[in-house]
Image (cartoon, rainbow, N blue to C red):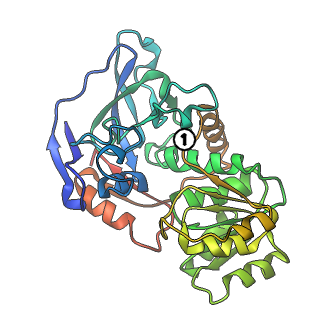
């Protein structure tokens, strides 16, 4: 089969298209013919060593073992079964839950042995992938490409909203609102949980598309007085922040939160380190949450909301598998709306 491997830490020149043997499913696994795999920050940061190098580079203590096939947002068709898998699974169109874990129900994502597909296991930048049968779910939509844009971003966004216990009519600020997680934060917070959303982007040309996704207001982080604009539009401080940017908007976020407000971050595209005046935190009774991925039950609730069309796929562009380097470079450009998807069959 054709696959793209990360050969080591570095730039996109570390991505190599290779020929590999098609993997064999073990007893409780299935072989999946990959139809679509969308790109996430996590596989780029893994290649770049943003999580650290050596033993601190991956989700597990031993770090990433190169070469590795990246890719975690995967849809495809089950084409071969392990010896203990029920025959009814054969031929199903599935979406993959993106990690294994021995953690108890509700705590799978924080288990010490949590292992991620595309980091600890070979992932979806390939024509075939093997995965445990019980972590393969029916696709929420009929289209493979549309169903491939939710797994990591959607699960992360859903978990963020549930962590903050967002209520109807609360006001939520979403940073990086045009990205994969951000655009889903907008939809989940507004369309599923009934909140008012202030979406923060760079380019206000995205205002109408984001309002169609559920945003009440769309503002630019380039504003000279963003904090004041947010408070004016909301007619007062806001309830919560769903953040994927990190340092660039951290100070603004704390400034616009009400007393007792909540801040949840799942990314740091705008800076991985920040300064914090603890007085702001305790005098305003602000709660900080760190968040990534989520639980299998949350994944089921996400898929259910997608199947009901409460949440819609937002796709910026597709690339053939052989153009993975170009796709990752494009992914990092500003101004996109939604996900970038690799298509192994093209």
Residue 54 shown left or right of residue 205 in the figure:
left
Can you give x and y, in whole percent of width and height, for residue 163 in the image? 70, 47
Can residue 239 be seen here?
no
Local secondary structure at mark 1: loop
Can residue 61 be seen here?
yes
Circle 1 residue: 141
Q: Residue at x 58, y 40 (%)?
A: 294
Can you give x and y, in whole percent of width and height, for residue 8 in the image? 21, 50
10 Å crowding of disc 1: few (<14), some (14-19), many (20+): many
Depth check, front residue: 167 or 47: 47
Can you give x and y, in whole percent of width and height, for residue 200 in the image? 62, 73
Seen from this angle, which residue lies furthest top?
84
Residue 310 shown left or right of residue 65 in the figure:
right
Q: Residue at x 57, y 48 (%)?
A: 156
Q: Residue at x 30, y 37 (%)?
A: 122
Depth check, front residue: 316 or 331: 331
Seen from this angle, which residue lies furthest bottom?
224
Residue 68 shown left or right of residue 76 in the figure:
left
- Image quarter of the N terminus: top left
Q: Quadrant of residue 75?
A: top left
Can you give x and y, in whole percent of width and height, for residue 142 in the image? 51, 40
Q: Is residue 325 above or below residue 207?
A: above
Q: Quadrant of residue 224?
A: bottom right
Q: Quadrant of residue 230?
A: bottom right
Q: Residue at x 24, y 62 (%)?
A: 11
Mark count = 1
């Amino acid at each position: 089969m054709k696959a793209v491997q990360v050969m080591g830490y570095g730039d996109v020149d570390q991505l190599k298209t290779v020929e590999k043997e098609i993997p064999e499913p073990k007893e409780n696994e299935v072989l999946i013919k990959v139809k679509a795999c969308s790109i996430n920050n996590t596989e780029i940061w893994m290649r770049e060593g943003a999580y650290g190098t050596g033993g601190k580079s991956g989700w597990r203590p031993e770090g990433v073992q190169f070469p590795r096939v990246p890719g975690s947002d995967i849809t495809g068709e089950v084409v071969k079964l392990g010896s203990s898998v029920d025959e009814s699974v054969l031929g199903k169109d599935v979406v993959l839950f993106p990690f294994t874990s021995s953690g108890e129900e509700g705590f799978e994502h924080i288990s010490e042995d949590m292992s991620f597909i595309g980091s600890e296991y070979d992932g979806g930048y390939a024509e075939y992938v093997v995965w445990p049968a019980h972590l393969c779910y029916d696709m929420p939509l009929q289209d493979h490409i549309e169903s491939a844009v939710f797994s990591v971003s959607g699960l992360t966004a859903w978990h963020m909203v549930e962590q903050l216990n967002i209520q109807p009519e609360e006001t939520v600020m979403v940073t990086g609102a045009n990205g994969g997680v951000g655009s889903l934060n907008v939809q989940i917070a507004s369309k599923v949980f009934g909140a008012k959303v202030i979406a923060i982007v760079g380019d206000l040309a995205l205002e109408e598309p984001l309002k169609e996704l559920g945003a009440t207001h769309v503002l630019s982080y380039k504003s000279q007085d963003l904090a004041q604009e947010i408070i004016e539009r909301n007619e007062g401080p806001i309830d919560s922040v769903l953040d994927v940017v990190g340092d660039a908007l951290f100070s603004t976020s704390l400034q616009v939160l009400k007393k007792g407000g909540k801040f949840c971050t799942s990314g740091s595209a705008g800076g991985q380190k920040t300064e914090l005046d603890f007085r702001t935190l305790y005098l305003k009774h602000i709660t900080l949450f760190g968040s990534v991925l989520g639980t299998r039950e949350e994944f089921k609730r996400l898929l259910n909301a997608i199947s009901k069309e409460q949440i819609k796929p937002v796709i910026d562009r597709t690339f053939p598998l052989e153009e993975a380097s170009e796709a990752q470079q494009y992914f990092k450009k500003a101004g996109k709306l939604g996900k970038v998807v690799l298509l192994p069959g093209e």
